[in-house]
Image (tube, grey):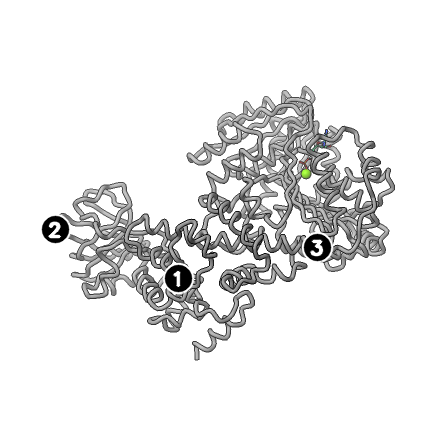
Amino acid sequence: MATTRRLSASALRPSRSRGSPLLAPVQYVKGVGPTRAEQLARLGIETVEDLLYHRPHRYEDRRRLATIGQLIPGQKTSTQGTVVAMSEKRYGTYQFQAAIADDSGVLQCTWFGQRYLRRLITRGTRLIVYGKVERFGSLVMTVEEFEILTGGEEDTLHTQRIVPVHPATEGLSPRVLRTIIHQALGSHAAEVPEILPADVVRRYGLPDRGAALRSMHFPSTLEEAEAARGRLAFDELFVLQLGVLIRRQRLAGIDKGYRYRAGDEVLREFIVRLPFPLTAAQERVIAEIVRDLRGSAPMNRLLQGDVGSGKTVVAAAALYLAVRGGHQGALMAPTEILAEQHLATFRQLLEPLGVRIALLSGGGRKREREGVRARVARGEIDIAVGTHALLEAGVTFPHLGLIVVDEQHKFGVMQRATLRRKGFHPDVLVMTATPIPRTLTMTVYGDLDLSVLDELPPGRGAIRTYVRGPEKRPEVYAWVRDMVEQGARAYVVCPLIEESEKLQVEAAVRLAERLQAEVFRGLAVGLLHGRLRPDEKDDVMRAFRAGEVTVLVATSVIEVGIDVPEATIMVVEDADRFGLAQLHQLRGRIGRGAERSYCVLLAGMGTEESRRRMEAMAASRDGFVIAQRDLELRGPGELLGTRQHGLPELRVANLVDDLPLLERSREEAARLLARDPALRDPDLAAVHAEVLARFGGRLDALSMS
Ligand code: ADP
Ligand code: MG
């Protein structure tokens, strides 16, 4: 019964292609019954394939396990021995203890909170234990992982070799997993289809896929395990690149159904009215966009440019062309404050040219909001600037031609998709200031064309960045006061409280009150946070812009986009709580005018990592350099945002460590598609199926994203 149920459930999963024996439910593996299947499901393992790809998180060389006498206090190691005594501690946190011994000595092992152990472990039990060894009088270990050796035939899988240790779960020990995976490899590894083209396998001298899976789990050397992992990572990245490139191909094949007639003279109308000459980079990027707009396929372009590089004016140019081409445009920003600012900028730049602009945000009166919606729906508004509110079902455009998403890393794939669906194959420009290394960009945003603003407008003052311990706070604030009295404007950024917006707001309120009452008494201190009403946000931003407020205490809501060139000072409280990319964005709020700016990072620098991060901030103003450092220090998750890029999950490959593989896989994927754009070759059936399985509907239903 259970089997059929599971089978039909997985057969219905839309993203899986049917037919491959590897996609059979994991119960097909000998030794896996309903209970095991449930436990495996907790590890995310549902199919035979999931099981084969359940990677060991480490290997243990049990060909030469350290004897107890060889253990070195302070190190994490494995050893084995026979249980000679047990005890329990029942008060407080439950502890189970067992002393194990071999010929060379005795080790006192401790487990926390696992009452069932007293039934499992008795005198004479042979154990392999893994954990940190310490010396407290006697030799002790807090056990992280352990295995019971049975002494029988089946131990050969678990001793005298390099054994894989797989991520396990309650009731499903590494030993059991190892056994099940071994079983699955025996019966299914041979069925694993090759997914790389034969010439690629040959050129790189790769092991075949089934063999690689075997070696990943049961290698005879650690080098073999790494080679196997590399091969499997390559597979995965290859499929990833194929998916991204196919998507790109298909986008390029769409006809948006009209041609732009608005030409260079229209663009010139816009440019001559600007209060500054464009930078060379802006000119280049605008030309790239114009080319896209005039093409037959919808534009899908990523504009990457460091904070302050002047992306807004590029967006305005594109939107102006769209409007003069007879279309509506929409610009979506992640915060109301930023949407308001864009509204003001566009009014200034575009209204004199006859463009009708309106704000669509979540705040304000319902009546007004509906009025704006109605005008947008009637085509009386040319450009709608807004927040997520643009995405609501009630917002419709009769002829939406261009979508701009600002600070796109703050949005998810689905949100962009929703906006896109409000037009018919609209042109899309997404902008981001979170630069990531180029190779990563080409993958994560591989279906987009890339434009880079690699130049800041001239005449920007330098930013000096200082890192100071909390004990220097009084001095720092006294200095800020001096500077403000001499005419400067300053941001004070509150400590980050990620857990709760409410707590965050309270902290901001308290900090503002304290500063106002103490060190900034007599100065005009403003407060800005996410929970203010839109008109309150407006008021305080306007006052800060006008210089009526000279110290702006703010949460990280100011992180994105805020542009007040007169502000030259920023103090960040508890700076080490912020990510590097975020700090870079925050600091990007100053240094926007000609004056020299100062950024003070107040940080306790508790850990080595936070010290390095603060140093990286002080050392560079270049977003690319900082992003690279962030990537090294924290891994890609932080940098890319979780799941927002919408790429399939990677089981083996790692976007940071496998950068060289990423590049190679992209080359190979492009080479293959040049030869066979639709992957029609029967030899490519397996890879084709894999691409479909991993990318699912996102390849066919392009309207989805
Ligand atoms: P970001 O790329 O961070 O979004 P903005 O578009 O907010 O940058 O631009 C930052 C500031 O630079 C704004 O005050 C804008 O008016 C100004 N700016 C943009 N382009 C130029 C230019 N070519 N010359 C001088 N100032 C410019
Ligand atoms: Mg911006």
User: Counting residues from the N terminus, which is met first, the one under dot 1 or under dot 2?
Assistant: 1
Observer-nearest residue: 577 or 222?
Answer: 222
The local secondary structure at tag 1 comes to: helix
Observer-nearest residue: 307 or 322?
Answer: 322
Tell me the kind of residue under disc 1. Answer: Leu
Percent x, y of residue 255: 73, 56
Q: Are marks 3 and 2 in contact (CB under 8 Å)?
A: no
The local secondary structure at tag 2 comes to: loop
Tell me the kind of residue under disc 3. Answer: Arg
Which residue is at 61% across, 29% downward?
570
Whether residue 159 is visible, yes or no, is: yes
Tell me the kind of residue under disc 2. Answer: Asp
Percent x, y of residue 433: 62, 39
Report the mark closest to the observer, 1 or 3. 1
- Name the quarter showing ligand 2: top right
User: Counting residues from the N terminus, which is met first, the one under dot 3 or under dot 2?
Assistant: 2
Observer-nearest residue: 701 or 295?
Answer: 295
The local secondary structure at tag 3 comes to: helix
Q: Is mark 3 within 8 Å of ligand 2?
A: no
Percent x, y of residue 682: 52, 65
Q: CA distance from mark 3 to mark 2?
A: 71 Å
The 10 Å Cα crowd at callout 1, few under 14, some 14 to 19, many 20 or more, is many
Relative placement, left or right, of 640 versus 28 is right
Q: Which residue is mark 1?
A: 52
Q: Which residue is mark 3?
A: 420
The 10 Å Cα crowd at callout 3, few under 14, some 14 to 19, many 20 or more, is many
Q: Which residue is mark 2?
A: 103
Relative placement, left or right, of 610 versus 286 is left
Report the mark closest to the observer, 1 or 2. 1
State the residue lying farthest toward the bottom. Answer: 1
